Image: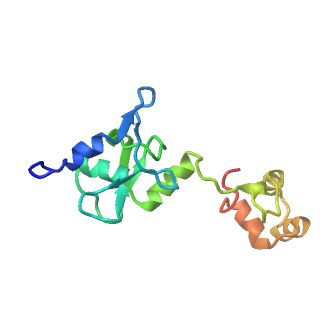
Amino acid sequence: MVGKRPMQIKDRFYQKFKADKKTGCWNWLDHLGKDGRGRFRLAGIKNYAELSSRVSWILHYGEIPMNMCVCHKCDNTSCVNPRHLFLGTQRDNMRDMIRKNRDNRRKGSRHPNAKLKESDVRFIRRSKLSNTELASKYGVSRPVISCVRRRVTWTHI
């Protein structure tokens, strides 16, 4: 309508989530991408929607430095509560995911190319046999045995 001011971004943003009293999360109710993360269309930018968690950070704390991600302490990708968000690099975000055991990569014997089992790894690490002997016993190369022993691989054991 002519004469009416367009709704401010913060006002629009605050209409698009609902607070969960149990978790404290502010769950995004508007558009969610295939990845489950909220999207917020900024005024005047056609065909582009920013991640709602990034918009929340900007509205509450200010600009996001270049090459920084907005990460979730709560691990709820649709949450926009600024108290549940923190800044970090992509590497920080991946470390957080792994530390919280949220990575969906298949580890150990569940990996389709695994030639060893968890029990094999435990034996290899305790064994007095040489890397050559162990490699022959398990049908893998000496560097594979070396990496297992030095905990470069199979780090979850």
Q: Is residue 60 visible?
A: no
The reply to whether residue 89 is in sight is yes
Quadrant assignment, res 12:
top left
Nearer-the-camera pick, 8 or 101: 8
Q: Is residue 26 above or below residue 34?
A: above
* Residue found at x 11% / y 52%: 2
Q: Nearer the viewer, residue 27 or 60?
A: 27
Q: Position of residue 19 (x, y in %)?
A: 38, 32
Residue most toward the right? 137
In the foreground, 45 or 145: 45
| Farthest residue, direction left | 3
Q: How many marks?
A: 0
Residue at the far top in the pictured view: 22
Q: Is residue 149 left or right of residue 14?
A: right
User: Horizontal and vertical percent for residue 53?
Assistant: 36, 50
List x then y, in percent, for residue 35: 52, 54
Question: Which residue occupies 58% across, 48% down?
Answer: 102
Q: In the picture shown, does residue 100 fall above or below 107?
A: above
Picture coordinates of residue 48 (x, y %)?
35, 63
At x 77%, y 55%, the residue is 110
Scheme of colours in the image = rainbow
Left or right: 17 as drawn, with respect to 23: left
Question: Which of 47/125 is in front?
Answer: 47
Q: Is residue 9 left or right of residue 149?
A: left
